[in-house]
């Protein structure tokens, strides 16, 4: 199933896997952040993000498919790299994937919109960074 392929491209924390699911001209809109244009820029963002994580795990709860669009809801588990407590955070996430139908990149993401509140994860990343500086 395509959603499992997407999840595995993220859950391994290997930014080079970005190209397996995103078309070169893809756009990523992640919550309230500015849109990221192009698979290479998406990979740069993913690389920076993955550097802060020791765990990323997507479990899809349900999805719907209409034409070239997939609406999906995931439970996403995170653990912050270097967190001595190894606390895991579960964050619900809704996504709308638009896939290419006609091109050499058929089946890859041309547009992804992600709706989630990662405040708890961001806060923990910042806390761990502050704790490292205080030592």
Image: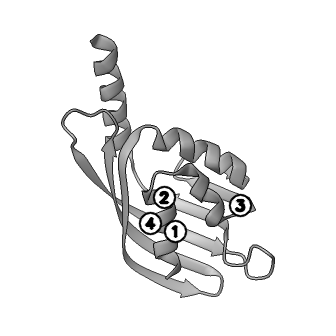
Tag nearer the camera, 2 or 4: 2
- Residue 88 place in picture, x, y as percent: 24, 49
Q: CA distance from mark 4 to mark 3?
A: 18 Å
Task: Point out the image quarter for the C terminus.
Answer: top left
Specify the farthest residue to the right: 103
Sort mark 2 into few (<14), some (14-19) or many (20+) by Cα contacts within 10 Å: many
Q: Are marks 1 and 2 in contact (CB under 8 Å)?
A: yes
- Residue 16 place in picture, x, y as percent: 60, 52
Residue at the spot of label 3: 26
- Residue drawn at point x = 56 percent, y = 50 percent: 15
- Residue drawn at point x = 52 percent, y = 62 percent: 9
Sort mark 4 into few (<14), some (14-19) or many (20+) by Cα contacts within 10 Å: some
Secondary structure beneath disc 2?
A: helix
Q: Is residue 116 above or below residue 50?
A: below
* Disc on the earlier residue, 4 or 1: 1
* Disc on the earlier residue, 4 or 3: 3
Tag nearer the camera, 1 or 3: 1
Q: CA distance from mark 2 to mark 4?
A: 15 Å
Residue at the spot of label 1: 6
Q: Which mark is residue 94?
A: 4
Q: Nearer the viewer, residue 90 or 83?
A: 83
Secondary structure beneath disc 1?
A: helix
Is residue 127 toward the left or the right of residue 13 in the image? left
- Residue 105 place in picture, x, y as percent: 75, 73
Q: Nearer the viewer, residue 22 or 71?
A: 22
Secondary structure beneath disc 4?
A: strand
Tag nearer the camera, 4 or 3: 3
């Amino acid at each position: 199933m395509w959603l499992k392929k997407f999840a595995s491209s993220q859950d391994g924390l290997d930014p080079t896997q970005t190209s397996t699911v995103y078309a070169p001209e893809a756009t990523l809109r992640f919550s309230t952040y500015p849109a990221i244009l192009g698979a290479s820029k998406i990979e740069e963002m993913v690389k920076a993000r993955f550097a802060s994580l020791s765990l990323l795990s997507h479990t899809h709860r349900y999805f719907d498919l209409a034409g070239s669009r997939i609406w999906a809801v995931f439970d996403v588990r995170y653990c912050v790299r270097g967190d001595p407590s190894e606390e895991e955070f579960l964050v619900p996430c809704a996504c709308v994937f638009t896939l290419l139908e006609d091109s050499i990149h058929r089946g890859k993401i041309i547009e992804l919109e992600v709706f989630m509140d990662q405040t708890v994860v961001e806060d923990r990343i910042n806390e761990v960074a502050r704790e490292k500086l205080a030592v």
